[in-house]
Image (cartoon, grey):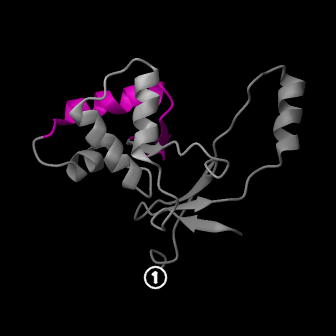
Amino acid sequence: MNRKCHHAQSKPVQLGNLEEKLHSRSLKITGPRQAILEVMRQERHPATAKEIMAALPKGICDLVTVYRAMHLLEKIELVRRFDFGDGTARFELVRGNTEDHHHHLVCTACSLVVELEECFPNALEQRIAQTSGFQRLSHRLEFFGICPKCQL
């Protein structure tokens, strides 16, 4: 099974590209938004709004601004929201390449998140779309369990 830990290095996203996406949607590139995007660019795993806030330079904005920015960035598809069943939203930057689509293993004891590169065959998604009549079908899949460290 191919696994890629979120903490591992992955190809960084150029901050300028993200700013261009905001600008192309006629959205202002405020100081807080730019700082939040920089934090998200450096994150290697889905992060909560509080984790993002903690990584920001002191005094740049408040937690409400982080939540508003994440909601906006999700709406314009620059970030993806994840719910790992604990009532806390986590956000991950949409990297915009073919390697972007992935699933997760989540430890229910320590919250470790591991990326899975494996996915369902495209033919399965096409067959589901065809039989259901749905268009622009996509999917998300998360697995939950206890990681090897927490089993000790």
Classed neighbour count for the residue bearing mark 1: other residues with Cα under 10 Å, few (<14), some (14–19), many (≥20) = few
What amino acid type should be assigned to the residue bearing mark 1? Leu
**Is residue 150 found inside the magenta-colored segment of the image?**
no
Query: Residue shown at 78%/21% (left/top)?
Result: 134
Per the image, label 1 sits on a secondary structure element best described as: loop
Query: Residue shown at 40%/44% (left/top)?
Result: 15
Q: Residue furthest bottom?
A: 152
Please state the horizontal and vertical placement of residue 120, each as a whole percent of the image.
Answer: 78, 49
In the rendered picture of this protein, how many numbered marks are placed on residues? 1
Q: Is residue 55 visible?
A: yes
> Is residue 128 or residue 99 the one in the foreground?
99
Q: Which residues are magenta?
A: 60-87
**Is residue 61 found inside the magenta-colored segment of the image?**
yes
Q: Which residue is mark 1?
A: 152
2 to the left or right of 86: right
For the N terminus, the quadrant is bottom right
